Image (cartoon, rainbow, N blue to C red):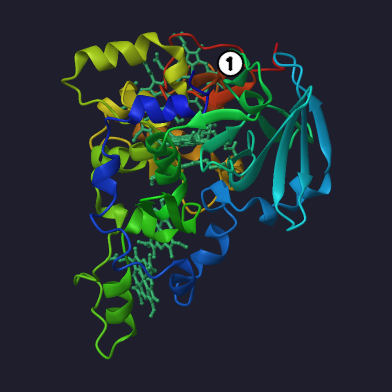
Amino acid sequence: MRSGWVAIGVALLATGLSAQSPANPRSGYVGSQTCGGCHAISKKQQLSNHALSLRAPGDISEIYGSLPFQFQDRSSQAILTFRKNARNQLELEASKGGQRELLTLRWAFGSGVRGITPVGVRSDATIVESRLSWYPSEHAYSLTPGASKNDPQTAIESLGRTLSLEEAQQCFSCHTTDYTPGPSGPMLNEMGIHCERCHGPGLEHVRLMAGPAPPASGQDRKILNPARLKAFAQLEMCGACHGKPPRDTDLSALQFIEQTPQTARFPSRRLVLSRCFNESVDGLKCTLCHDPHINVSERRAQRDQPCIACHSERLRAKARTCPVQQSDCVSCHMPKERVMLNFEFTDHWIRVAWVKAPKGSK
Ligand code: HEC
Ligand code: HEC
Ligand code: HEC
Ligand code: HEC
Ligand code: HEC
Ligand code: HEC
Ligand code: HEC
């Protein structure tokens, strides 16, 4: 069975992921610390959810703060216990009858906006996605998305879902910067999504910019600046992780996305259905509404500005104005869509088709 998180990976398996990763990912990477020496944005980026989306469990104090944590699994009746082992590592134990199985948790996926899923390695080197995830909003461990569909019987099955090497590699390639699939498992370099995941390896850029004759603006600075990408190319870049956008000739994919509300999880797949995207002169880039270096919460107060910029009386020739309301556009035209049991995603298919009343309004 697939977990809820993995559904993303599966949906995107055939995407440009490999196009995003250079043939030899190690070469030419300098690490975000180096970028931070010259670019002030690094301070904020390091605290962003992109950067925090993969960490060592030991770096997440709130997980450790509530140990040991016990949970009785309803399927197997096993008792699951999270605790610190003698080497101060996070460990999951499943015990049932006389059986006792252990999983050493090495990686924590997710900043915690929705949840944090630990992934670990069993003594036989199998990689396992923990059956329990940490939910900061509830301050507790509970079933990992998708885990309720599995029906473990034994202690070992109760630890979680076994990931094939290939699947584990997919998780890592979306949640790390410079990732190398290793012969004996994933070798991780910079955990979380930092500068060079989006800008490409920076060694040449750093040499040039720190050298005696740094190129002036307009000259090649040997680093990708995605600001120069056209809208669809940018959607594809972000879409390596946020959902591969279909081309406008791929009618069956467009139809599938239109008819499947769960695709709201993939902003880049939904956005291309919007008239705002299709009828604007230069399309609609993710970065018109998002600064990918910071979290959405930091821009919430300004989130209607891009809408108003196009849909204002002044620019009426470009896009119509709303007959209903001149503020809080997002709450009516980009409502949240419930995708998994407890998770809502902002629907990036901007439209009036099924405007729902925003929560708390009349
Ligand atoms: C030695 C200082 C230095 C370091 C280290 C450095 N940069 Fe730069 N970078 C600059 C300067 C100076 C510019 C030009 C002014 C600007 O855009 O901030 C620049 C420009 C850029 C641009 C815009 C390029 C363009 O053509 O428009 C990007 C993107 C960028 N840097 C990313 C990075 C990343 C990612 C790293 C780390 C891998 C990094 N930089 C490390 C100095 C540096
Ligand atoms: C194709 C890229 C991709 C793959 C593969 C992938 N993820 Fe993710 N993951 C994302 C994106 C994008 C998000 C944020 C949006 C969302 O939740 O759908 C995310 C969100 C998450 C979150 C929630 C983060 C939070 O703070 O709320 C967890 C936990 C997570 N992934 C774990 C995993 C695990 C474990 C695997 C492998 C079994 C995996 N992911 C595979 C791209 C991916
Ligand atoms: C999730 C992808 C992503 C990550 C991670 C990321 N960037 Fe960017 N960066 C972008 C995009 C997209 C743009 C273009 C923004 C725009 O068009 O407004 C950009 C623009 C820039 C620019 C040029 C700004 C300008 O004025 O033209 C610099 C410099 C830069 N990033 C540095 C960094 C550094 C340093 C880091 C790491 C601390 C980093 N970025 C991490 C996606 C990313
Ligand atoms: C390498 C995969 C990857 C790429 C490329 C990527 N993202 Fe993300 N993005 C993620 C993951 C994973 C998360 C969830 C992080 C978490 O909370 O754990 C995320 C979260 C976000 C968020 C929510 C941040 C918040 O406030 O919680 C925004 C907005 C976002 N990405 C926009 C972008 C944009 C725009 C681009 C392209 C410039 C982009 N991303 C490229 C993987 C990626
Ligand atoms: C880059 C410019 C641009 C931006 C930004 C933009 N739109 Fe649009 N939008 C358009 C254009 C062009 C159309 C099609 C012509 C029209 O409706 O006047 C459109 C159409 C619409 C429609 C009508 C859809 C339909 O099916 O008839 C709605 C509703 C809408 N936009 C709301 C929004 C909201 C809300 C935002 C902000 C979240 C937004 N737009 C951002 C350009 C934009
Ligand atoms: C309270 C919910 C609500 C809010 C808030 C809201 N709208 Fe609307 N909007 C609607 C409804 C309902 C319609 C359809 C009206 C109709 O067809 O008579 C509509 C229609 C539109 C249209 C299509 C116009 C047309 O002539 O058919 C656009 C464009 C639009 N809205 C943009 C926006 C923008 C931009 C904002 C923020 C400045 C906004 N809306 C705020 C509910 C809302
Ligand atoms: C017209 C504006 C607009 C564009 C364009 C846009 N977004 Fe968003 N996005 C939003 C708004 C508004 C939210 C909700 C922000 C909030 O909760 O405050 C959001 C939320 C998100 C989130 C957080 C998770 C969620 O579902 O709430 C992610 C991830 C995201 N966007 C990614 C993207 C990516 C990737 C692109 C490009 C394919 C993109 N967005 C393009 C307006 C936009």
Frontmost residue, 30 versus 46: 30
User: What type is the residue that disc 1 sits on?
Assistant: Asn
Q: Is residue 116 above or below residue 14?
A: below
Q: Residue at x 51, y 49 (%)?
A: 50
Asked if residue 74 lies left or right of residue 307, the reply is right
For the question of whether residue 130 can be seen, the reply is yes
Q: Locate residue 245, reporting x and y percent.
A: 29, 29
Residue farthest left in this picture: 249
Q: Residue at x 66, y 20 (%)?
A: 154
Q: Position of residue 258 (x, y in %)?
A: 35, 12
Residue annotated with mark 1: 150
Q: Is residue 259 left or right of residue 356?
A: left
Residue drawn at (31%, 26%) of the image: 272
Visible in this render: residue 327?
no
Q: Quadrant of ligand 5?
A: top left
Q: Is residue 260 above or below residue 163?
A: above
Q: Position of residue 58 (x, y in %)?
A: 69, 55
Does the closest atom of ligand 2 sit within 8 Å of the Cβ of label 1? no
Report the quarter where the C terminus lies: top right
Which residue, as the protein is rendered here, is positioned at the far bottom? 212
Name the spot of residue 136 as percent of width and height, x first.
73, 38
